[in-house]
Image (tube, grey):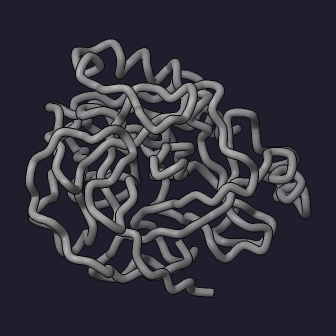
């Protein structure tokens, strides 16, 4: 992401708690966000904890032939080089890539990871909401993207590898395709943004997700409750003009998610979202991220 951020408050003790309702932070100045997915001990993709035992991420993160045991999910993470004492590192038991995923067309770019055991909620590990099938935010609604990816196309996040966040606005699919149709890249073609995708960024570029942020959350606030509206999927470069970031549209895959997450015993323990938003799905969880001062690197 093209930004640098610094913390503005102290963390509370790592006390256990029951979730207050999805998407509702317990620590002042924080928003719900994502997790760090680690392969052989190294961060390589983001994700969002959508129940106490399930993580949503991007399918393209799991195209290599690798043992499931080589993956861990770190929750409550803030600085990768300086692990918090509140961090939880959970092994992964299963990975489900959507059967319609296409690396060519970038469609159905969603995967679910099942953790070996349900995680326990703390002040840093709390739920985020999934939107219902008919729920949507208006165009130009401001949302947040978070992750530990590159801060520019050729610049890795420097130590201590502090969690980054950037505010972006939602862009209508037709408007997003119109931007991508300006001098379209041959490997992308015209009208590359499909109905199961959602765009967020700015026509002028500069603020965007980047490599290493894949699979992480596009989180949108509705009356103080945070919803996982998208998953970082693809883009042309990072922060380039006329090339918004493209995300998995979560409402397009609610039923597929529910088939997996709702089929186990964990589903019976998830409360209903109480945000006042119509059509909200049962609550899912993610760890909290610090809302801080942003210094945008232009």
Identify the residue at horizontal 33%, vertical 46% (top origin): 286
- When asked about the image quadrant of residue 167, the answer is bottom right
- When asked about the image quadrant of residue 27, the answer is bottom left
Q: Is residue 210 above or below residue 173?
A: below
Q: In this view, does 255 lie above or below 188?
A: above
Q: Is residue 273 above or below residue 141?
A: above
Is 13 left or right of 185, judged from the image as shown?
left
Q: Where is residue 29 in the image (x, y as percent from the top left)?
A: 35, 68
Identify the residue at horizontal 46%, vertical 38% (top origin): 275
Q: Where is residue 295 in the image (x, y as percent from the top left)?
A: 51, 86
Quick one: 271 or 82, which is closer to the camera? 271
Quick one: 251 or 191, which is closer to the camera? 251
Q: Is residue 218 visible?
A: no
Q: Position of residue 42 (x, y in %)?
A: 27, 60
Is 175 left or right of 246, judged from the image as shown?
right
Is 203 left or right of 63, judged from the image as shown?
right
- Quarter the C terminus occupies: bottom right
């Amino acid at each position: 992401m093209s930004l640098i951020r610094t913390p503005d408050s102290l963390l509370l003790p790592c006390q256990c708690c029951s979730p207050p309702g999805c998407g509702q932070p317990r620590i002042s100045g924080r928003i719900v966000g994502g997790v760090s997915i680690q392969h052989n001990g190294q961060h390589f993709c983001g994700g969002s904890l959508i129940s106490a035992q399930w993580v949503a991420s991007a399918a393209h993160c799991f195209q290599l032939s690798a043992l499931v045991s080589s993956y861990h999910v770190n929750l409550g993470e803030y600085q990768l080089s300086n692990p918090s004492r509140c961090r939880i590192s959970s092994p992964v038991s299963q990975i489900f890539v959507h059967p319609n995923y296409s690396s060519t067309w970038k469609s159905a770019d969603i995967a679910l990871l099942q953790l070996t055991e349900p995680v326990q909620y703390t002040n840093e590990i709390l739920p985020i909401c999934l939107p219902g099938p008919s729920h949507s935010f208006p165009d130009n609604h401001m949302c947040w993207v978070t992750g530990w990816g590159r801060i520019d196309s050729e610049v890795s996040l420097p130590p201590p590898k502090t969690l980054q966040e950037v505010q972006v606005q939602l862009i209508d699919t037709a408007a997003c395709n119109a931007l991508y149709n300006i001098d379209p890249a041959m490997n992308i073609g015209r009208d590359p943004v499909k109905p199961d995708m959602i765009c967020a960024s700015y026509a002028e570029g500069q603020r965007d997700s980047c490599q290493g942020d894949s699979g992480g959350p596009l989180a949108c606030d509705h009356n103080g409750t945070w919803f996982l509206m998208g998953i970082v999927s693809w883009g042309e470069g990072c922060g380039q003009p006329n090339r918004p970031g493209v995300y998995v549209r979560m409402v397009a895959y609610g039923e597929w998610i529910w088939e997996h997450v709702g089929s186990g015993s964990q589903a019976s323990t998830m409360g209903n979202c109480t945000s006042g938003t119509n059509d909200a799905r049962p609550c899912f969880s993610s760890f909290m991220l610090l809302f801080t001062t942003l210094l945008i690197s232009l």
